[in-house]
Image (cartoon, helix red, strand yellow):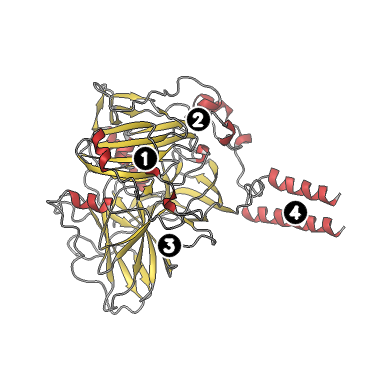
Amino acid sequence: MAAILKLILLGFVCFTGLIIRPCLAGDPTVTYNFVYSFKNLSPLGVSQQVIVVNDQFPGPIVEAVTNNNLVIDVKNKLDEDLLVNWNGIQMRDNPWQDGVSATNCPIPPKGNFTYQFQVKDQIGSFFYHPSTHFQRASGGFGPFKIDNRSVIPLPFPKPDGDIVLMIGDWYTRDYKELREVLKAGKDLGIPDGVLINGKGPYQYNTTLVPGGIEYENIPVEPGKTYRLRVHNIGISTSLNFRIQNHILKLVETEGYYTTQTNYSNFDIHVGQSYSFLVTMDQNASSDYYIVASARFQNESQWERVTGVGILHYSNSQGQAAGPLPDPPNDFYDKTWSMNQARSIRQNGSASGARPNPQGSFHYGTINVTQTYIFQSLPPTVIDGKKYGATLNGISFLKPVTPILLADLKDLKGDYKLDFPSKPLTGHHRLDHSIINGTFKGFAEIIFQNNDTVMQTFHVDGFSFYVVGMDYGVWTEDRRGSYNNWDAIYRCTVQVYPGAWTAVLIYLDNPGTWNIRTENLDRWYLGQETYIKLVNHEDKGTLFAPPDNVRYCGALASLQTKENRAPSINGNMKLAVIMLVVVLVALVDLH
């Protein structure tokens, strides 16, 4: 009888959602409550409306351990719809939580949505951000850190501290104004500056930087080693990151450990994340500059587009002074940055999320089952209707009803499985085209950048091996130059203008997943598509829609209060759980 009562009590807890994942699995649950709202701030000395999370800019860090279950309730206090994308989190079998517009319905103003997902077999440095309406240009982003389980050793001594740096170009104009500029077919122009953790530059130059601007100040202890997790969450500007007189030891990128290589400076492109170990081995005669400056631009015109923070030793004897540390001198050498990118290799001897070597998957011996060539071109007017950016000649139109919902209710006509595997010839078009992928296929994707700007591309739900990059037009004979041994595995890769980047990807995650440029201006103008993967062998592997699924488009009438999961107060939840524990103990006593 006691056993039956205990089962009933446990069932009550699971049924009411007080403990969401542990009822189904033994992994711990981590809970966050996010409120998205506006706040007037002056990161570059000019008052503007910024999107904050829990009144913070950037938003609070999400911290988890491999295999933790995340429950993140997002309340929308903006004046527009909102979706939050968890950049680099793979959402295994669970695209309902991905937070992009062609798979999920948005959170309306004054509404909320509770994201529930597991960081399955992942470690590393990522970030979250709003994915629609160009909102990321005004904030709403924050870091996401997944630590190793205690049984999995780090491939380096445990650092003395963990420091997050979110860098990115910034405009003082509101994101709504910026998107109207894009719609009109105009360029956004030179950014007004670069922010480091939401703060403007230290006044290293009284001509370029006005006084009174709050800057980032990082306190450190001499002799200690810190892990710096650096994310470029800007709009379109590649940045060179460096710390005066300090060496950056690269150890991880987007969830995978790299060979440990020392750099004096490092190019970080839009949407990319890296971890460096930095030892505080300099004398404390003064503070040191932390710099993030624009790359591949006219230096004299872009000189003010520089983020500057301060590395402050606890025994420092004075302020940082003098010129900033020099950026790469590669004006006449187009391959310097590309060679640096090629030098990033997988650490095959390190364990990642599982206790086995990362290099144990011999990707170079697997036969490619399908090849996609994605060509990007400069934005243009399409069919005389809309200014747009294209992949393979198609500027993506978001379906009225998200793809997952359309499939759930067997709606026709909201999207088409006809995205071309190579660039179209002839006129460009606006369309709902997505890729009909082969589940468990091993795909080769070539990103061919025929645009005039540096671009980065990202694939939701996956990581991929970066096997090659070079200038010119990709042809089949370029496969002979691929790195088939220790290519880095990541989810966001740069593609230089007039060049190509080749990646290999195992399509083992069923669902519908976004493939996009991370350049926010090009993404907003339609440079994206989706890949649909159906597991016909076991349809039960794909997560069913969550109880709180939102409905929109042709299914908007199904949206009722009943399918909006309540946000349970944390104290109330704890009280009820404790009550259940007490009742279980009483049952045992009897």
Q: Mark 4, mark 3: which one is toward the viewer? A: 3
* Quadrant placement of the C terminus: bottom right
Label located before the other in sequence (4 or 3)? 3
> Marks 4 and 2, how far apart in space?
41 Å
> Which secondary structure, mark 1?
strand
Q: Which residue is mark 1?
A: 504
Q: Which residue is mark 2?
A: 534
Tell me which amino acid carries mark 2.
Val
Q: Which residue is mark 3?
A: 155
> Marks 2 and 1, how far apart in space?
19 Å
Tell me which amino acid carries mark 4.
Val
Tell me which amino acid carries mark 1.
Leu
> Which secondary structure, mark 3?
loop
Q: Position of residue 312 (x, y in %)?
A: 33, 72
Dot 2 surroundings within 10 Å: few (below 14), some, or many (20 or more)?
some
Tell me which amino acid carries mark 3.
Pro
Dot 3 surroundings within 10 Å: few (below 14), some, or many (20 or more)?
some
Q: Nearer the viewer, residue 405 or 180?
A: 405
